[in-house]
Amino acid sequence: MARTITMLQAINEALDQEMARDSSVIVMGEDVVGGSGAEGEMDAWGGPLGVTKGLYAKYGDRLLDTPITESAFIGAAVGAAASGLRPVAELMFSDFVGVCFDQIYNQAAKFRYMFGGRAETPVVVRTMYGAGLRAAAQHSQSPYSIFTHVPGLKCVMPVTPYDAKGLLIQAIRDNDPVIFFEHKGLYETEGEVPEQSYSIPFGEANVVREGNDVSIISLGLMVHRSLEAAETLAGEGIQCEVVDLRTTSPLDEDTVLESAENTGRVVVVDEAPPRCSIATDISALVAQHAFDALEAPITLVTAPHTPVPFAGVLEDQYMPDAARIAAAVRRVAGYAQ
Amino acid sequence: MALTKDDLLKAYRLMRTIREFEERVHVEFAAGEIEGFVHLYAGEEACAVGVMLHLTKADRIASTHRGHGHCIAKGVDVPAMMAEIYGRATGSCRGKGGSMHIADLDAGMMGANGIVGGGPPLICGAALAAKVQGTRDVGVAFIGDGASNQGTTFESMNLATVWNLPAIFVAENNGYAEATAADYAIGAGSLADRAEGFGMPAATVDGHDFFAVHEAAGEAIRRARSGDGPSFIECQVNRYYGHYEGDAQTYRPPGEAEAARANHDCLDKFAGRVTASAGIEREELDDIDRAVAALIDGAVSSAKADPAPAAAEYLTDVYVDY
Amino acid sequence: MSASDLRALVMPKWGLTMTEAVVVKWLVDEGADVELGAELVDVETEKILSAVESPASGALRWRAAEGSTIPVGGLLGVIADADVPDDAIVGFAATFEAEFTPETEAVAGEGPLPQYVEVNGRSLRYLKLGEGGEPVVLVHGFGGDLNNWLFNHEALSAQRAVYALDLPGHGESSTNVGDGTLATLAQAVADFMDALELPAAHLVGHSLGGAIAAELAGTAPDRVRSLSLIASVGLGRELLAGFLDGFVTARRRRQIKPVLEALFADPALVTRRLVNDVLQYKRLDGVEDALGAIARNLVADGQQTVSIRECLATYPGPTLVIWGAADQIVPASHAGGLPERTHVEVIEAVGHMPMMEASARVNQVLAAQFEGRLTA
């Protein structure tokens, strides 16, 4: 039975149900419990934003607080995954990948291939990403394209509570390493979520709004902003089709191309900087495989090629918003060869 | 743990197999039969075998660039290893890994590792899995003096102590990280001093001496199996060949490797001791030598004759569910 | 219809979540004469495209513009006699618009909601509409749920209490289907009737639901006031090759869409929303196993393995069989060779989902069945 909960609750519920279902699922990370070794209460934090709160009471030692030692514990999660567990490791901010990337991209990502298909690494790395919280340059990035670039990793970025639960359950059950990106700005997003467990297959983009005039291909928080733009544009007679990629690896190329072929006009919206990004990747995909259908240049709406600034007036400009998306769509919709 | 005659013969056979394997790969590489990067373990056999004689199949190890010896001692199929080094479909990794990535998780071998310091975090994970699952299995991270300076090693030793993991860190200090001397690169009195700083007992042993390694490893593994947490062992040893095959080794003083072979060879030491005091006849060891030579001969011939992977294989083993 | 008798054609409410729909295409010209129950206009919600029927006989004097979005209860058209002056029509429409308040989403949620009942360790979801009369129980087909009746449930409930349930393994009921046999599923329906204190009811079953209803009619005829089977399984051997397997194993939109399209004569009825709803259901843990267990009891080697003809032969009550002539899943020829007292209704140009594709006709026939007005 479905009821309305937040994305934060949906992620907690997915972890809860999978830990209940499968004793090989463990959770580790910095303060995923909070209070280890201290004199006060355990589960003091339940994760820096409370995502894992309450799980310690049910699963005890299957939740492990780690020292601030990303190389060791992300690597330990990988090693445990190759040794029979299904660890869910929390890399608090995806910006911190700089101190543990080897464990993800040289170890986890390569085992299956490098060992000739004779190893499985069912590890999930949950990690926060995204700007908008005035968290500045080292706590606000959207580095999913770096991970998407690595063969052997699967990259997931849920947009709704429903997707968050189903995609996380899929991630835990998946036998490959999965990087699960959670946008800080989406935790309080509400939506209908079934109480039962369910899983959403990877590589299945979601058409969240149908329209025949312009395709907006987007991911993460930007899907919400794209929908906001699409609503405004509908009032002007421009019907947008909004595609949420859901996973960038595997990428649902077919749904992107179907939409591009349907509308002939494509705007790609991405919160990350523009070089070697998901936006450029989608643009290349469409240009390569749907060129004949295009009636206007593919247009990218992205962050600028700068670090994420701190001050509100700066950060607000940095992030693509509905107005910028709408302006891009208007240009594309009005383009005549 | 008292060593029976069977144990001793097994130890000798494993060390001899590693030696024969490496000497033969050296020859075949020089003859142009093997491609890529190969790092030989010859000279260090007592380290791998001294540790591995305590381990079961379910215990896990992580290895280094110089991984052939660890693989053989842990029970990875020798002809499959040779086939892997030749890039054959019949290899341990079906020709996709090569010398630097031989792995066999079923044998508890989590991979030779192309990243210096890649193994210790993985062994924390293997040890954690054993702890969570309530087995008495252990994880052993082999590192070199090079990896002893990596942050991953420090972090892993700390984490192993924090989580009281059944993990053992075995540093094979052969005096050189690539072409840089350990004396230059290790900014501490000794590796054992460092380990003690991470709160675990540490031992320094002669890595040419099987019995010394075996005894130190026995104590460390007993501690781990009893839930008493991690330990560290430094094995001081020599490598007979370069960092990689093709290394001119001009950074080494002339005659260093030869002197080590003449005066500290682990097989010579071992044979001398067991024939003198353990009731083992030289003929028994010679029989083993002949059997091992035949095994390696056979492994090389079959590797040469085995098929390369099917061309389409380069696309498989990613995204099984894609 | 008298000159003063103007009737508003309003946007119907199909299903609990519907709040508005788009006028896709008028099927009747402005000014044309229309009969009560005739299909006048295709409208499309997020979920489905369907026709709205005329609430009266008369002339269609005013039509909402194609492409416009009309809230539930809003004005789609005006039916009046041809001699009503245009001014009066315009005035009627203007007054209607002025007085109409669309229900907000908050209010939309306040209609009757599905409920849950514990039956033999299973939780079964059901929706009850209407009160009194001889109750009706609607039993959906394989992979369906109570929403399959969205074009029928409200219409049928004007005179009586109508219950639509989710079978075990379906919708939001428990996924435990036991051995997945017809007998088990029929027992679940009987248990459901017990739990809701329905000693007997008119049973309407679609496809698999038809066979379940017939099984119950055969084993407990006193509990079945009348039996109405829509595109039922169990009346012949043929079944569209790969349909059940395709439905059971599909996990993705591209896999399920062609399977769903085979259900309808008009594949355009399979909207993205419908596909998403089916996928959401199928993604639930246990559903694939439940459907697989049921499927194994229904077919072997691509042929149906159950027969309800024996049940129909022994069941003494009124029996109605409805079929779409263009049914690709179970051919309409299976409606042949039934006991003589059976009323058979084959509807042209309709597929396996007549209650959706020809809801007006199906509702009329079912109402007649419940009121005992049908003859063989």
Image: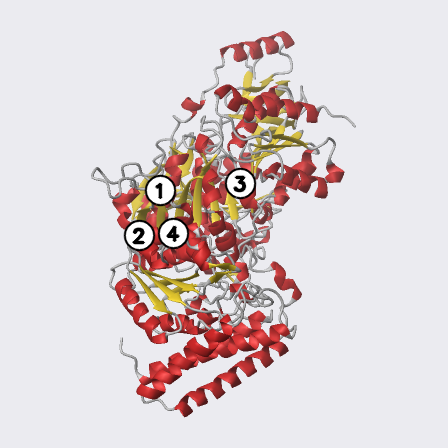
* Mark 1 to mark 2 CA distance (whole Å): 23 Å
* Disc ID at residue A30: 1
**Are the residues at dot 4 and dot 3 in contact (C-beta closer than 8 Å)?**
no
What's the residue type where badge 2 is placed?
Answer: Gly
Residue position for label 2: B197
Q: Mark 3 or mark 1: name the one nearer the start of the chain.
A: 1
**Within 10 Å of the Cα at label 3, are there few (<14), some (14-19), or many (20+) other Cα atoms?**
many
**Chain holding disc 4:** B
Question: How many neighbours does mark 4 have within 10 angstroms: few (below 14), some (14-19), or many (20 or more)?
Answer: many
Give the foreground label among 2 and 4.
Answer: 2
**Pick the front one: C371 or C293:** C293
Circle 1 or circle 2, nearest the eye: 2
Q: CA distance from mark 2 to mark 4?
A: 10 Å
| Residue A144: mark | 3
Label number found at residue C311: none
Q: Which residue is mark 4?
A: B154
